[in-house]
Structure formats: C-alpha cells, structure tokens
Image (cartoon, rainbow, N blue to C red):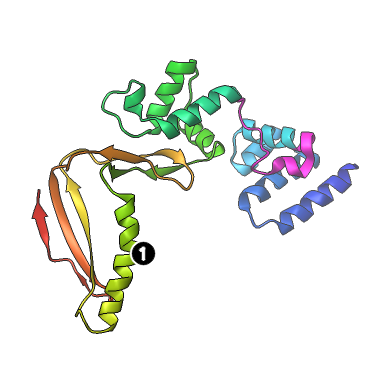
Amino acid sequence: MAKEEEIERLTTAMKETESTRMYERYLAVRLHLEGRTLTEIADILGRSFPAISGYWKAYRKQGLQGLGFGEYPGGIRKLSDEQEEQLKETIAQQRPVDVGFEAKCTWTLRLIRAWILREFGEKYTLKGISKMLNRLGFSYTKATYTLVRASKEEQKQFREVTLPELKEQLNQGEIDHLLFEDESMIRACLALQYNGFPKGQQRKIPTHVEHKGAKLFAAIDYETGYVDPSRRRKI
C-alpha cells in the first residue's frame, strides 16, 4: 500500500472514531508516516517513547486493526498459559489465608503480586497486576459475608409462596402494611476489602458467628415506599 493511501486511511479512521485514545494512536502513526520521528511524536502527544514505538510496531504488524485496545501488544507476558490458569483458579477458588497469607480473606492487588512472586518468581507492578486481571476476565469488587447456615430451600419458599400470600392479604385488606426491613452493620472487626474476582461474581466469605458491632435498621413500606430508619441496636 502506498504511503499516501495509508495516510488517507488513517485520516478517515481519525474522523470516524469516537474514542480519543484511538484518535491519538491513529494520529501518532500518521505523523510518523508524514516524516516525524517517534521521539518528536512522543513530545507532541505527551506520551512515552515506548508507547509511541508500540503503536508503530502494532500498526506495521497488523495495520489499523493492530492499534485496537484488544490487539495492542503491550509488555511481554511473564506468565505462561498454565501459570495464568493456576492464578485464575487460585483467586476464584481459594482465599489468601488458604495459601499461606495469615488472616487475609480477600485477594488485593498487593497479595496477588506477592503470591505470583512466591510461586513463579516474577515481579509485577500493581498496575501490571490490574491489567492482567482485567485481561483474564476479573473485575475489582468487594467481597461479602454469606451465612453458612442459610437455607436456600427456605429462601425459595419465601419468594414463591410466602411473599405472594402476603401481597394478596395486603390487597384484600387483611393486613394494614407490608414492611421490608434491612440492616447496615458497623463491624468492630476489619471490613472486607475490594478484591479481584471473576466478572459478574462476588466473593463470599463463609461465617459461622455473628460479628460484634452495631446494626442500623430501616424498614420500607411496600405500598408507599416510605422509609423508617429510626431503629438501631448494639450486638
């Protein structure tokens, strides 16, 4: 493809894209085709030389497609496919305390970095860990406690039988109000932290005991939507 044609295609792509980041990548390549050095382009766009060089290499290898976010090569992968699978399974199936990190229930970026260094001898920055987790299909979410003794059968019974019956009683005037109550707990223990976990899921920490703290209760009226936040108790 002639250089003039390449420049024309890049100009068209710059006009059509709605992404400022993609616009910048197209512009960097176009400037280089027009005779600017990579160092000059880095100064113009306020980017590092390795970043601009990466755009150019990706473009020479795969054309416009190579500049897409999913195709940008970035740094060299330090972990093999097998090691990444082991990492994914460990984060999803085990807690830090299960693999030797005392009194740690959720996977923070620092703990994941420490685990990788211990298991594979590879060093990462926290930003590098974050990018890898995103590529592996993880998101940064907050864990929650789940009661081990909770009965799924009783929960299903409430949703499918008890709740419809209560609604019908309300409609027939047999009861005056239908209130839903919820609570917010201020724990005396350390709150659970945000951690990496597969996208669309939330880590649940099994607990057998009631944690000490203070509970704030509020009730919402099913019909009116009125919220009564007045009740509280210490436990």
* Crowdedness near tag 1: few (<14), some (14–19) or many (≥20) residues, C-alpha within 10 Å: few
What amino acid type is highlighted by mark number 1? Glu
| Residue at image mark 1 | 160
Residue at 15% across / 41% down in the picture? 188
Give the answer, above or below, for where 45 lies relative to 216. Answer: above
Residue 189 figure quarter: top left
Q: Which residues are magenta?
A: 59-78
Q: Is residue 60 magenta?
A: yes
Q: Residue furthest bottom?
A: 173
Residue at 51% across / 25% down in the picture? 86
From the top left corner, tell me how far across and down residue 85 is, in percent.
Answer: 54, 28
- Position of the N terminus, as image quadrant, is top right
Q: Residue furthest right?
A: 2
Q: Nearer the viewer, residue 109 or 214?
A: 214
Residue at 78% across / 49% down in the picture? 10
Q: Is residue 185 left or right of residue 141?
A: left
From the top left corner, tell me how far across and down residue 31 is, in percent.
Answer: 75, 43
From the top left corner, tell me how far across and down residue 33 is, in percent.
Answer: 80, 40
Give the answer, above or below, for where 73 lies relative to 188. Answer: above
Q: Is residue 168 left or right of residue 91?
A: left
Q: Is residue 72 magenta?
A: yes
Residue 30 figure quarter: top right
Task: Tell me the element at label 1.
Answer: helix
Q: Is residue 30 visible?
A: yes
Residue at 30% across / 68% down in the picture? 163
Q: Is residue 174 left or right of residue 72?
A: left
From the top left corner, tell me how far across and down residue 214 is, in percent.
Answer: 13, 50
Residue 96 figure quarter: top left
Q: Nearer the viewer, residue 14 or 202?
A: 202
Q: Nearer the viewer, residue 111 or 154?
A: 154
Circle count: 1
